[in-house]
Amino acid sequence: MANTESAKKRVRVTERRTAVNRARVSRIRTFIKKVETALEAGDAAAAKAAFAAAEPEIARGVIKGVLPKNTASRKISRLSARVKALGVSAN
């Protein structure tokens, strides 16, 4: 357990940041799930709209430090390919 005031503060800050980061990752997963749901339903227009909303959210995850850059690129690329395969241009 932390003894010094600065160590106690670091524990508090870490708990706060962890909560924020968990919320960010959860939000990203929700956006990805919306795209996947639209893809499974075969709804091209909804998939395109969901992908357009998910792409900047995933990129923001990289900026905020909750996702590795290559992971985000891979997720965006794979979702884009699946949306494009449905017959709609992803961009």
Image (spheres, helix red, strand yellow):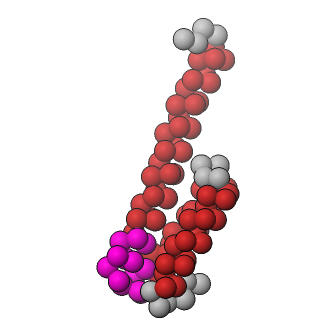
Q: What's the residue at 54%, 79% (across, down)?
A: 81
Q: Please tell me whether residue 87 is drawn above or below residue 64 in the rendered image.
A: below
Magenta part of the chain: 35-47
Q: Position of residue 67 (x, y in %)?
A: 60, 52
Magenta stretch contains residue 39? yes
Quadrant position of residue 60: bottom right
Q: Residue at x 51, y 51 (%)?
A: 24
* Placement of 14 over or under 53, stated as above or below: above
Which residue is outermost to the left? Answer: 41
Residue 22 vertical placement versus 79 (above, below): above
Name the residue at 63% across, 13% down: 5
Vertical placement of residue 6 versus 21, above or below: above
Which quadrant would the C terminus be assigned to in this image?
Answer: bottom right
Magenta: main secondary structure? helix
Pick out the residue farthest to the bottom.
87
Asked if residue 69 lies left or right of residue 38, the reply is: right
Inspect this view and state whether residue 49 appears.
no
Report if residue 16 lies within the magenta region: no
Please identify the quadrant where the N terminus is shown. Answer: top right
Which picture quadrant has residue 13?
top right
Q: Could you say which is closer to the camera, residue 41 or residue 5? A: 41
Q: Position of residue 86 (x, y in %)?
A: 44, 86
How far across and how far down the image is residue 44, in percent?
Answer: 41, 86
Query: Image check: 51 left or right of 60?
Result: left
